[in-house]
Image: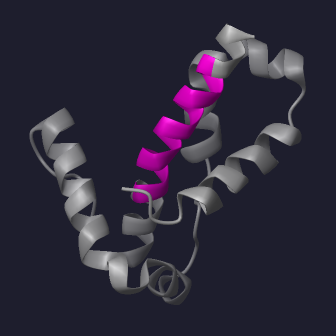
């Protein structure tokens, strides 16, 4: 799923620009955690609903598939727009960070 992937990519790029390269190198294994798990991507129910738009049910299905394949169960509160947005950003963030690390290793 690529819904608002570019926006999430920009969030990552902005965050990375604010970090020292040595810090990045020393924390590369926890980079995803620091970017997408130590703060909320979206705060507020209204803002989250607006962000989800017409894709809300596709995003919920995407999260359910992800969590069921990894954990055998769904842990995200799918009745909370905030939780849904933030989990979606977390999942897409995994892909973005993985691509970033692969580019570092190639360079």
Q: Residue at x 59, y 24 (%)?
A: 30
Q: Is any part of residue 79 visible from this angle?
A: no
- In the image, residue 52 above or below residue 78: below
Q: Answer with left or right where residue 51 lies relative to residue 102.
A: left
- In the image, residue 18 above or below residue 30: below
Residue furthest out toward the front: 106
Q: Answer with left or right where residue 49 lies relative to residue 6.
A: left
The foreground one among 66 and 45 is 66
Q: Residue at x 26, y 70 (%)?
A: 58
* Dominant secondary structure (helix, strand or loop) of the stretch shown in magenta: helix
The foreground one among 1 and 53 is 1
Q: Residue at x 87, y 21 (%)?
A: 21
Where residue 83 appears, as percent x and y from the top left, is 39, 66
Q: Is residue 9 magenta?
A: no
Q: Is residue 90 magenta?
A: yes
Where does the magenta region start and end? 88-102
Q: Answer with left or right where residue 66 lies relative to residue 1.
A: left
Q: Quadrant of the N terminus?
A: bottom left
The foreground one among 39 and 41 is 41
Give the total number of marks visible in the rendering: 0
Where residue 17 appears, as percent x and y from the top left, is 87, 40
Q: Quadrant of the C terminus?
A: top right
Where residue 54 appears, as percent x and y from the top left, is 36, 85
Where residue 5 appears, as percent x and y from the top left, is 54, 57
């Amino acid at each position: 799923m690529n819904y608002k992937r570019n926006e999430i990519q920009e969030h990552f790029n902005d965050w990375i620009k604010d970090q020292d390269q040595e810090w990045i190198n020393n924390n590369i294994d926890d980079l995803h955690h620091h970017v997408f798990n130590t703060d909320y991507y979206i705060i507020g129910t209204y803002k989250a609903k607006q962000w989800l738009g017409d894709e809300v049910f596709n995003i919920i299905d995407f999260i359910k598939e992800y969590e069921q394949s990894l954990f055998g169960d769904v842990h995200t509160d799918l009745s909370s727009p905030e939780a849904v947005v933030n989990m979606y950003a977390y999942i897409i963030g995994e892909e973005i960070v993985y691509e970033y690390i692969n580019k570092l290793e190639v360079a």
